[in-house]
Amino acid sequence: MTAPQANLLPLTCEDTVGPYYPLPFLDQDRMDLSQVHPGLGVRPAGEPITLEGRVLDRHGELAHGVLLEFLQADPAGVLRGPDGQGGDPMFEGFARCRTNGAFRLRTLRPGAVAADRAPHVTLTIFSDGFSRLVTQIFFEGDPRNAGDPVLSSLSEDERPRLIARREGEQDGALRHVLDIVLAGDGETPFFEDRDADRTGD
């Protein structure tokens, strides 16, 4: 009787069969810019804030089926370019969500993109019935609001419609709240893309 042969192959650790996808490939909508990605421990530097609100139709009801895109400079006032270059490499500056009216963006307070601009977030809205609407959201209490060319181009009645109110803190971030009204009474001022480009975004 022959002796059993020894196993000549080294033992390996148990593991799940691949393929393996990096966590960023699993993203759907991204509405937290205060971290690089939930799967990573590194974070961009800056003051965390939240921007919250509702998108309302002409009747004051929540606008269903809208896509929102947010674009902003990093805390130093630098916008990331189309090639992904520029500014804090840990801060993307772009967020997107599909919503039935309400939104909540956690981000870092943006810096001013130019000497005459106040810190702001550019918001683009897509929905049925229009191709796109573009506006900019500013922050209550910033002294640079008074000289910003976009806010200065509006009437006294219209300016508050672009300034997010400060409403306490939540989860270590200062809350800013603003509703976006698509049409009718209290309609949010919207701009042509070329106007936003000319004023810094």
Image (spheres, grey):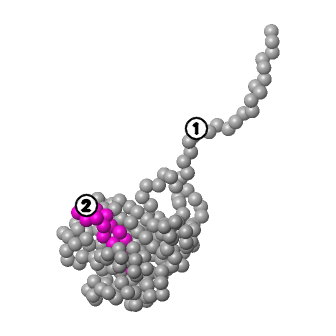
Task: Count all numbered tags in the image, as a single digit.
Answer: 2
Task: Looking at the picture, tell me which residue is in the foreground, 84 or 72.
Answer: 84
Farthest-out residue, top: 1
Task: Looking at the picture, tell me which residue is in the foreground, 36 or 171.
Answer: 36
What's the amino acid at mark 2? Answer: Asp
Q: Position of residue 118 (x, y in %)?
A: 43, 84
What's the amino acid at mark 1? Answer: Val
Residue 180 included in the magenta stretch of the image: no
Answer left or right for 41 relative to 73. Answer: right
Q: Residue at the spot x=59%, y=64% of the render?
A: 42
Q: Is residue 136 above or below residue 37?
A: below
The residue labelled by disc 2 is: 128
Q: Position of residue 135 (x, y in %)?
A: 34, 75
Q: What SS does tag 1 mark?
A: loop
- Of label 2 and label 1, which has the lower sequence position? 1
Answer left or right for 15 relative to 10. Answer: left
The quadrant of the rendering that contains the N terminus is top right
- Residue 196 visible here: yes
How crowded pointer 1 is (Cα within 10 Å; few <14, some 14-19, many 20+) is rated as few
Main SS, magenta region, reads strand
- Residue 179 visible here: no
Q: Position of residue 73 (x, y in %)?
A: 48, 75
Q: What SS does tag 2 mark?
A: loop
- Tell me, yes or no, whether the two marked residues, 2 and 1, touch with CB atoms within 8 Å: no
Check residue 17 in the rendering and tell me which mark sits there, or answer none.
1
Q: Residue at the spot x=30%, y=80% of the render?
A: 161
Span shown in magenta: 123-138
Answer left or right for 132 relative to 184. Answer: right
Q: Residue at the spot x=43%, y=65% of the render?
A: 95
